[in-house]
Image: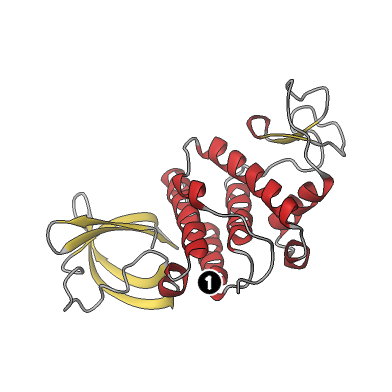
Amino acid sequence: MLRTHKLGEADRIVTLLTRQHGRVRAVAKGVRRTSSKFGARLEPFMVVDAQFYIGRSLDIVQQAESLGAYGADIAGEYERYTAASAMAEAADRISEAESTPQQYFLLVGALRSLSRGEHAPHAIMGSYLLRALALSGWAPALDDCARCGAPGPHDRFVAQLGGLVCSRCAPAGSPRVAPDALDLLRALLAGEWEHVDAASEHALAAASGLISAYAQFHLERAIRSLGHVAARPAGRTP
């Protein structure tokens, strides 16, 4: 479940990322009533098995069974909630163009990890964003120059050019990136969590800033929730 909007006095419009049919928008009738039999299941960050009646403009939810009740554990902690909101917002944007089962499973896995507090919330979010973009064909260049292909190592990261660039291709004023932040970017993209959990707060903050800029440039839209994501050191959430 990506997001919801109120409709009338008791209904909601829900937006879901599905395994087989990409993004689906549907009306959930009566879910805001206390007597609704599946209202709590149709909340953001929940994973459900849903059945729909196909409508002209919007489908109608007929049934919803819970498969992953991650919403309460995520919503109960601010950092988890903001990270999940940013992931859902990015998934919504990505699925406007195309969606695959891999995108679905990636998001579900990230929400599950977030709800369990397995790693720092913004580290999970950063890994999700990099891997979701890579699945869409926008993997950042983290070794050779993104523009001319010159072999690395390079230390200039330019989101508009696709990642790391050599000194000849880097626009004037391009900031240098510390080696530990670049190593962390590679670990987040590869899902190497031992490396991620051992990273310094400074490296994680630097990597998060690069990921934010890169994701928003390639999605061609600001991810509003990223403005509320607070950086924390890597490791398990207390």
Q: Is residue 116 left or right of residue 195?
A: left
Query: Identity of the amino acid at label 1?
Result: Arg
In the displayed structure, would residue 151 be above or below residue 60?
above
Quarter of the image containing the N terminus? Answer: bottom left
Q: Residue at x 74, y 51 (%)?
A: 203
Within 10 Å of disc 1 (Cα), the crowding (few <14, some 14-19, many 20+) is many
Q: Is residue 145 left or right of residue 54?
A: right
Q: Residue at x 74, y 63 (%)?
A: 192
Q: Position of residue 105 (x, y in %)?
A: 53, 65
Q: Residue at x 56, y 62 (%)?
A: 106
- Can see residue 64? yes
What is the basis of the colouring in this image?
secondary structure
The residue tagged 1 is: 112
**Which quarter of the figure has residue 49?**
bottom left
Q: Nearer the viewer, residue 155 or 47?
A: 155
Q: Nearer the viewer, residue 165 or 119?
A: 119
Q: Residue at x 49, y 35 (%)?
A: 220
SS at circle 1: helix
Q: Nearer the viewer, residue 7 or 149?
A: 7
**Which quarter of the figure has residue 173?**
top right
